[in-house]
Amino acid sequence: MSQNNIVLSVADVSKRFGGLNALSDVDLQIEEGTVHAIIGPNGAGKSTLLNVCVGRIKPDEGHVIFDGEILDRHKPHEINQLGVARVFQTPEIFPDLSLLHNVMLPALAKRDGAFKFNAWVGLERENALRQEAEHILEDVNLYDERMQEAASLSRGNKRRLELAMGLIQKPRLLLLDEPTAGMARHDTNRTIDLLKKLKARGMTKVIIEHDMHVVFSLADKISVLAQGQIIAEGTPQEVRGNPKVQEAYLGGAH
Ligand code: ADP
Ligand code: MG
């Protein structure tokens, strides 16, 4: 393996919820330009880890370092400004706005600083941004629906809309929490193709995924989380054959 730059480093992170150790001494290094998958059974702590990385949850111990900055000392919007974008497990979209405006807003918020409630007043004047949003909607196969209200979309399409909202920010690091959850197989395949296209453009991504088909078609490296601990790490081939991983899955909810 070549010596790549480390973009994100999770160092000894622990997080408890009451008596439950959701994360215990988690260490993780994400190399620039790679797709790094985090897999593990339900309740393993995957979403918690991602939320720690974007500042939504403060770790009890340890740190998250991105590009020399200690992220867990920053607020979520500051982390976003530093170049980290995320797509959550439950899509966070603006249901009453058109798809086009949904995609334009995160770029405006990033450009103009903290989110302004009257941001959409100026949306019609943002021609360059509108074109960019249209291109991205083409990328995610939602161009024909661009003038519809986001609320009208199917669950799978809402997830792709949220992906578009992440992409327009041109983040250095994109974090995706189960981007294909709720999608039918053909939709999942379209999303995998899209993520592969993005991979060719070199965007670093951390992807949480339970769909092994998605993981093995995309990931350069996989970390396996079980009961809040990293139990295995390596290439898809290395992880696939690891007995600890098979055991964690058999003992888990999946
Ligand atoms: P995963 O994404 O791997 O399914 P989560 O990170 O969502 O797992 O959850 C890990 C564990 O922490 C689970 O047992 C879950 O019930 C618990 N948990 C997650 N968030 C909270 C919270 N805000 N309060 C209490 N417990 C939580
Ligand atoms: Mg989760």
Image (cartoon, grey):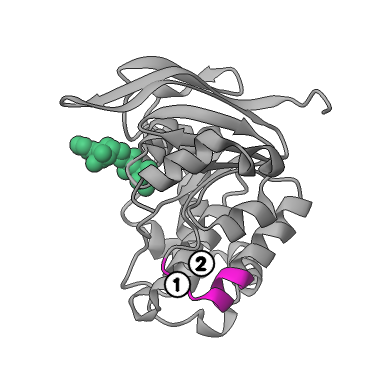
Q: Is residue 168 visible?
A: no
Q: Amino acid at mark 2?
A: Arg
In the displayed structure, 128 sits above or below 9; it is below
The numbered mark at residue 128 is none
Q: Is mark 2 within 8 Å of ligand 2?
A: no
Single out the residue that lies furthest toward the right: 2
Q: Position of residue 137 (x, y in %)?
A: 59, 71
Image x and y of residue 32, in percent: 71, 33
- The answer to whether mark 1 and mark 2 are in CB contact below 8 A is yes
> Is residue 254 located in the magenta-colored stretch of the structure?
no
Q: Is residue 226 above or below residue 126?
A: above
248 and 157: which is toward the camera? 248
Which one is nearer the viewer's eye here, 9 or 243?
243
Asked if one can make out residue 118 in the rendered structure from this viewpoint, the answer is yes
Task: Indicate the quadrant containing the C terminus: top left, top right, bottom left or bottom right.
Answer: bottom left
The residue pinned by badge 1 equals: 156
| Quadrant of the picture in which ligand 1 is shown | top left
Disc 2 residue crowd, few under 14, some 14–19, many 20+, Cα 10 Å: many
Q: Is residue 132 above or below residue 11?
A: below
Discs 1/2, front: 1
Tell whether 193 sits left or right of 4: left
Residue at the image position 54 percent from the left and 75 percent from the top: 185
Question: SS class of the residue under badge 2?
Answer: helix
**What is the magenta range?**
182-190
Amino acid marked by disc 1: Gly
Q: Residue at x 36, y 58 (%)?
A: 92
Residue labelled with disc 2: 160
Query: Which residue appears farthest toward the left when viewing the image?
Result: 18
